[in-house]
Image (cartoon, rainbow, N blue to C red):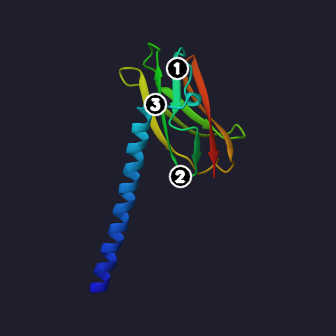
């Protein structure tokens, strides 16, 4: 009985460690998007009416991709985000509602169906007639 109790405590400790690690990853991801030294290749042109960027230029399987952007459109229409793999196949999409200041953000985990190939992946943002895209590298 005592061994069972120690075994359960050990399992709870491991689970708590995993939860803490995920929380740290999310916090680091959000703080990275607020820094001013974001790599130029991940930013869209400042003059664009629909900006979209990611927090890194390269990702590996199970990395968290932090996506953020800004719409200068007066429309309250949501922004459709999508990722295409190296074959041009859409492997992820999400509709994001804009905040009052026109900004948007979300998190995506790199991996799963469609993420089998290493190479250049494309993140697209569309809002009505506005569109923009950026590329990033993925390695499994």
Of the image marks 2 and 1, the number of the one nearer the N terminus = 1
Of the image marks 3 and 1, the number of the one nearer the N terminus = 1
Residue 2 in picture, x, y percent from top left: 27, 85
In terms of depth relative to the viewer, which is nearer, 77 or 107? 107
Mark on residue 96? 3
Mark on residue 31? none
SS type, badge 2: loop
Is there any visible trace of residue 97 in the rendered image? no
Mark on residue 50? 1
- Mark 1 nearby-residue class (10 Å; few <14, some 14–19, many ≥20): many
The extreme right residue here reads 87
- Mark 3 nearby-residue class (10 Å; few <14, some 14–19, many ≥20): some
The extreme front residue here reads 37
* Image position of 53 (left or right of 14): right
Residue 73 in picture, x, y percent from top left: 47, 14
What residue does disc 2 label? 62
- Mark 2 nearby-residue class (10 Å; few <14, some 14–19, many ≥20): few
Query: How far apart are the alpha carbons under marks 2 and 1?
Result: 28 Å
């Amino acid at each position: 009985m005592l061994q069972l109790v120690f075994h359960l405590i050990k399992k709870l400790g491991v689970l708590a460690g995993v939860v803490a690690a995920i929380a740290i990853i999310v916090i680091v991801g959000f703080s990275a998007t607020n820094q001013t030294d974001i790599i130029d290749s991940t930013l869209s042109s400042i003059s664009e009416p629909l900006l979209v960027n990611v927090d890194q230029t390269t990702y590996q399987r199970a990395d968290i991709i932090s996506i953020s952007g800004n719409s200068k459109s007066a429309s309250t229409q949501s922004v459709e985000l999508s990722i295409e793999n190296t074959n041009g196949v859409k492997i992820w999409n999400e509709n994001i509602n804009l905040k009052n200041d026109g900004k948007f953000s979300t998190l995506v985990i790199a991996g799963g169906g469609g993420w089998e190939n290493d190479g250049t992946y494309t993140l697209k943002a569309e809002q009505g007639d506005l569109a923009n895209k950026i590329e990033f590298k993925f390695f499994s």
